[in-house]
Image (tube, coloured by chain):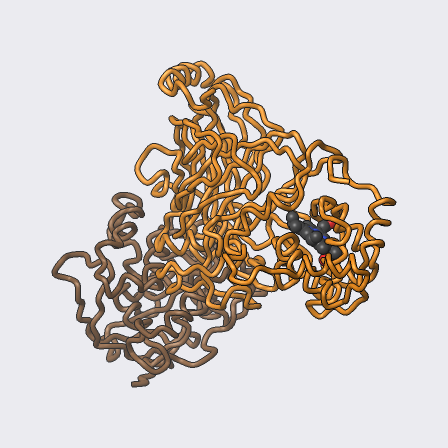
């Protein structure tokens, strides 16, 4: 399963592994016909993108430096934990990049010839624990996630890649920081993120729409709530990202 | 007089006044942590009021040696108390601390509008939102977080209260306190030490580990008990955050003169226990007449003794008329402890009296009589086991304080005890009523029992000794001689 795709010009970029194909059942299906999404296989970064990798990116594409970026693309908090625009300082190169906006994350992935994973892809990848590909109904796994969600952020985040990988070979999907997904607000793909986004709307209060087996999938509810609180230019201290790529992209 | 009367007129007046005062400078709302309540607005007309609330996720003790990560409106559970006036226009700022893991929002039951502000206040970590509303209805309202999964946000402590005063304000009282009940669900058992995570399954099963007033066991006990003085009028703003349980709110030894049920405009008089729904409130008023300790409980009584739903009001009164001894408290607790009809009547007290008269009272007889008397008099507070109730009633079992001085313990039983005492290294600061209505030999037997039970070993106390202490020590005025 471990299919390494490193060794590009981008020395810092994380290895990727193949995830899927698989079936993802969204808690709030976009339409009645979409209660089950069959996802083709895709590649996903083994770890979240690090400060080191992001430094290489903003050096190569200075329009994304924190002192040059447009406010609509990243709010004032962007990379606030760095000492300077090109100087992570205290921020360890192996710690996950955080205080990054969705626009920054998307541009970084594009720079690598990749993209952000969709919510469905991310959830499929994150449903695995160390042994099972779909552990969402495993009480111990669920408890572990809830315990992490219930804790405030630590002052310093650990480095990426610590601990055991999940059954897909992925690290840190849980327990380190939140991650951006491509379609986090369902409307982000369209140009205006503010219109039509009702955080109290269907995905938010519509718990009644969830079928009974998923009503106690609190971790999923919490991720959905988190994502729906976001705007594309927000930068948050416990929100990072990793990149994905279509399988066809391997043989570029 | 009805505090919340004439709502329609008031709104009309409010609307008029608010246009008149539209130019006036906005007022920054005073917010308080429980049990404090902001002062009355004292305003004759509505105003624009700015409320700034910061959501923080914090790890705090939920019980002694037990920590829990609370999600809070302002750093404590319950959240900050907000006090405004009917007709006010509130500009509400909700910030979510950058250290937060979760997005949060606020649904104020005082808001008329979809979601009570929830949609407009949905705030990611490190962000801040703003919305405005006009307080159309007077009353005491709960606010809470409504972010999915709502139950978990509420179970973690995301609630508080907002008081919307009627135009004429509330009647004057001597003290106002903010008390809010909530149920908590931890993976570990009640009082299991360490950092305890939220237990989703227990929450779904409505099987609370803790039921608490003001977010931690002991929040209103010991040094933190709510003080009052004899003769004062007290008003409690009582809320119930839930998420699951309904509160049977009761103050042991008090009758509520008035209860504004459900925080609304009408009051009921002479109430013993008032029901407070999850997500609901009550305003409770009473005059304290007699010094002593008054436990506030959820009268679903196992919650009080086994889950933490216990707070205390300590009424100090240097000297007052009819001080009532122990009995008043007995009545409430004794229900489940009072001896039922027993086939063989307990003759231990009579036997002790006979032996004493005959001049050959044995230690065994004294202990047997003392046990019977203790269980009708002292066990209500100190418990039949002598272990007391942590932070409320000190233990007699292996009590260094008790055993250090025999005659002092006689004086305590006769005259009661107030102020700070340290028992086995733990500080208590409460009030024990005098028991001087008991006879010398009854007190002698009780103390002989107490000093020779629960692991204590000591010499007998004689009626002569008690009578000497009675003759030479002072009792609070009003206590029996
Ligand atoms: Cu919340």
Residue B393 on image: x %, y %: 66, 54
| Residue found 57% across the figure and 59% down from its top | B345
In the figure, the orange chain has which letter? B
Q: Of residues A10 and B166, which is closer to you in this image?
A: B166
Compared across the picture, whether B22 is left or right of B367 comes to: left
Residue found at the very far front of the displayed protein: B358
Residue B268 on image: x %, y %: 44, 30
Compared across the picture, whether B435 is left or right of B181 comes to: right
Answer whether residue B134 is visible to the viewer in this image: yes
| Residue found 44% across the figure and 49% down from its top | A75
| Residue found 57% across the figure and 68% down from its top | B193
Position of residue A149 relative to residue B438, above or below, is below
Answer whether residue B427 is visible to the viewer in this image: no
| Residue found 50% across the figure and 19% down from its top | B24
Q: Quadrant of the C terminus of chain B?
A: top right
Position of residue A159 relative to residue A228, above or below, is below
Q: Of residues A13 and B151, which is closer to you in this image?
A: B151
Chain A is shown in which shade? brown
Compared across the picture, whether B11 is left or right of B359 comes to: left
Q: Of residues A152 and B261, which is closer to you in this image?
A: B261
């Amino acid at each position: 399963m471990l299919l390494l795709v490193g060794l590009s010009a981008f020395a810092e970029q994380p290895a990727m592994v193949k995830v899927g194909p698989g079936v993802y059942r969204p808690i709030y299906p976009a339409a009645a016909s979409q209660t089950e999404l069959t996802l083709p296989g895709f590649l996903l970064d083994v770890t979240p993108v690090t400060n080191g990798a992001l430094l290489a990116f903003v050096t190569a594409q200075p329009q994304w430096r924190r002192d040059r970026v447009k406010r609509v693309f990243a709010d004032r908090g962007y990379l606030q934990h760095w000492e300077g625009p090109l100087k992570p300082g205290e921020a360890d190169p192996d710690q996950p990049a955080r205080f990054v906006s969705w626009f920054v994350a998307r541009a970084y992935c594009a720079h690598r010839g990749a993209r952000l994973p969709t919510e469905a892809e991310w959830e499929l990848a994150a449903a695995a624990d160390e042994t099972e590909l779909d552990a969402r109904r495993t009480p111990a796994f669920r408890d572990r996630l809830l315990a992490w969600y219930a804790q405030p952020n630590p002052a310093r985040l650990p480095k990426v890649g610590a601990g055991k990988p999940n059954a897909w070979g992925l690290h840190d999907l849980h327990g380190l920081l939140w991650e951006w997904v491509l379609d986090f607000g369902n409307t982000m793909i369209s140009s205006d993120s503010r219109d039509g986004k009702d955080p109290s709307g269907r995905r938010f209060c519509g718990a009644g729409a969830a079928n009974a087996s998923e009503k106690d999938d609190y971790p999923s509810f919490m991720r959905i709530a988190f994502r729906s609180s976001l705007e594309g230019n927000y930068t948050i201290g416990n929100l990072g990202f990793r990149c994905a790529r279509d399988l066809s992209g391997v043989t570029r | 007089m009805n505090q919340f009367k004439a709502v329609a007129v008031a709104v009309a007046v409010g609307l008029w006044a608010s246009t008149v005062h539209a130019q006036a400078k906005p007022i920054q709302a005073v917010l308080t942590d429980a049990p404090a309540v902001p002062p009355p607005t004292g305003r004759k007309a509505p105003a624009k009021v700015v409320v700034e609330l910061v959501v923080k996720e914090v790890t705090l003790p939920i019980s002694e040696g037990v920590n829990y990560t609370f999600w809070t409106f302002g750093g404590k559970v319950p959240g900050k108390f907000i006090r405004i006036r009917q007709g006010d226009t509130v500009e509400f700022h909700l910030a979510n601390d950058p250290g937060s893991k979760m997005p949060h929002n606020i649904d104020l039951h005082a808001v008329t509008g979809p979601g009570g502000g929830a949609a407009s206040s949905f705030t990611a970590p490190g962000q801040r939102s703003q919305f405005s509303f006009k307080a159309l209805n007077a009353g005491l309202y709960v606010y809470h977080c409504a972010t999915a999964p709502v139950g978990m946000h509420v179970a973690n402590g995301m609630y508080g209260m907002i008081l919307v005063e009627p135009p004429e304000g509330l009647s004057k009282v001597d003290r106002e306190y903010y008390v809010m009940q909530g149920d908590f669900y931890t993976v570990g058992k009640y009082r299991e030490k360490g950092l305890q995570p939220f237990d989703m399954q227990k929450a779904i099963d409505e099987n609370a580990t803790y039921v608490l007033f003001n977010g931690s066991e002991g929040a209103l006990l010991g040094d933190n008990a709510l003080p009052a003085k004899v003769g004062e009028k007290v008003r409690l703003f009582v809320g119930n955050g839930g998420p699951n349980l309904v509160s049977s709110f009761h103050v042991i030894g008090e009758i509520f003169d008035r209860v504004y049920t459900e925080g609304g405009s009408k009051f009921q008089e002479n109430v013993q226990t008032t029901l407070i729904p999850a997500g609901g409130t009550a305003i409770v008023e009473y005059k304290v007449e007699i010094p002593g300790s008054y436990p506030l409980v959820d009268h679903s009584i196992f919650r009080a003794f086994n889950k933490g739903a216990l707070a205390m009001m300590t009424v100090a009164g240097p000297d007052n008329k009819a001080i009532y001894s122990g009995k008043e408290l007995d009545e409430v607790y004794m229900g489940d402890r009072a001896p039922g009809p027993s086939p063989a009547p307990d003759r231990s007290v009579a036997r002790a009296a006979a032996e004493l008269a005959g001049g050959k009272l044995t230690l065994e007889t004294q202990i047997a009589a003392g046990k019977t008397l203790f269980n009708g008099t002292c066990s209500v507070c100190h418990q039949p086991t002598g272990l007391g109730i942590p932070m409320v009633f000190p233990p007699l079992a292996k009590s260094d304080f008790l055993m250090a001085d025999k005659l002092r313990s006689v004086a305590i039983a006769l005259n009661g005890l107030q102020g700070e005492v340290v028992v086995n290294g733990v500080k208590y600061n409460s009030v024990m009523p005098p028991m001087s209505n008991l006879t010398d030999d009854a007190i002698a037997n009780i103390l002989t029992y107490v000093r020779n039970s629960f692991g204590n070993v000591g010499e007998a106390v004689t009626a002569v000794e008690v009578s000497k202490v009675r003759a030479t020590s002072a009792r609070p005025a009003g206590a029996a001689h």
